[in-house]
Each structure stands twice: as structure tokens, then as C-alpha cells.
Image (tube, rainbow, N blue to C red):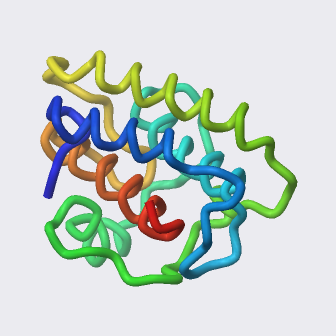
Amino acid sequence: MKSLFDAEAFSEIKNRLNNLSENSERQWGKMTPGQMVHHCQAPLNIMLEKVDYGFKPNWLAKVFFKKSLYSDKLWKKNMFTPKQFRETGTRDLVREKQNLEALIDEAGGQRDRAEWNPHPGFGYFTKEQYGKMQYKHLDHHFRQFGI
């Protein structure tokens, strides 16, 4: 799995984000492009410790789902979305793209950071696991819109 902390994957993700438009055709799911981009900010906000989404430690998630966050296996379409990450409101795509790009840049700027605080729901991730997880989440949703 590629990592957001790798320069080539980092550039790829930013280029794909720039290719997203209101006309990008959804391949699955219910979110609009603006909702999807807003949704994609949440895992980065958690990693960068910007927002507390109210997650509680969950041993079931740690045992049965954590490894899938950073493994090479692609996620299935229409996966379960935690209620904290569900999007239903109207979102301005231009503003949301700017916000997501700023978070991607901030995360990329921390590629040399060795220690990360534990994720509120899944516990500790290594830098490598966090980089792969962030790339995988963005890739999943960009594929959702054919980019």
C-alpha cells in the first residue's frame, strides 16, 4: 500500500484532488463530491489532533478492523461509515478542497515525525501505518468518484 508520507504518493493524491469537480461521477455511495471531500478531512483531523469526534476505544474494531485500515487489500464499496463521519448537508466543493489540501499538506509536512499519539478508537499506529491508512482512505474515496 502506498503511503501519504511518500513523496510520489503525496503528489498523486494532491493531483487527484485537483481533478475532482462537481461533475465527477459517483461510482457508488450517496455522497456528493463536496460531502466526500469534507468526510475525507476527518481521519486527517484525528491524526493531526485537530478535532475530537467523540470516538471511544473499541476492542472489536482493534481486533477485527484495524489491520484493514493499512493493509494492501482495497476496501469494499459501500462500507460502514461511523456516525461521526456521515455526511448529509450541503458542502461547498471549492472550500472543502482547500481545507482538505491544507490538511494533506500539514500531514505531509510531518512525514519525519516518529511518534504519534494513539488514535481515540483504534489505539497506536506507527508512522508507516498512519501514512498507509491516510493514503488508503483518500484513494478509496477518489476511486468512488472516478479520479
- Is the C terminus in the top left, top right, bottom left or bottom right quadrant? bottom left
From the viewer's perspective, is residue 36 above or below residue 125?
A: below
Closest to the observer, 61 or 146 = 146
| Residue drawn 21% across the image and 59% down it | 70
Tell me where residue 25 appears, x and y as whole percent. Answer: 61, 70
Tell me where residue 123 appears, x and y as whole percent. Answer: 31, 49
Judge left or right: residue 101 versus residue 110: right
Q: In which quarter of the image is residue 95?
A: top right
Q: How many marks?
A: 0
- Is the N terminus in the top left, top right, bottom left or bottom right quadrant? bottom left
Judge left or right: residue 81 versus residue 6: right
Q: Quadrant of residue 119?
A: top left
| Residue drawn 44% across the image and 56% down it | 57
| Residue drawn 48% across the image and 27% down it | 103
| Residue drawn 70% across the image and 76% down it | 30
Tell me where residue 122 appears, x and y as whole percent. Answer: 35, 55
From the viewer's perspective, is residue 106 above or below residue 45?
A: above
Direction right: furthest residue: 90
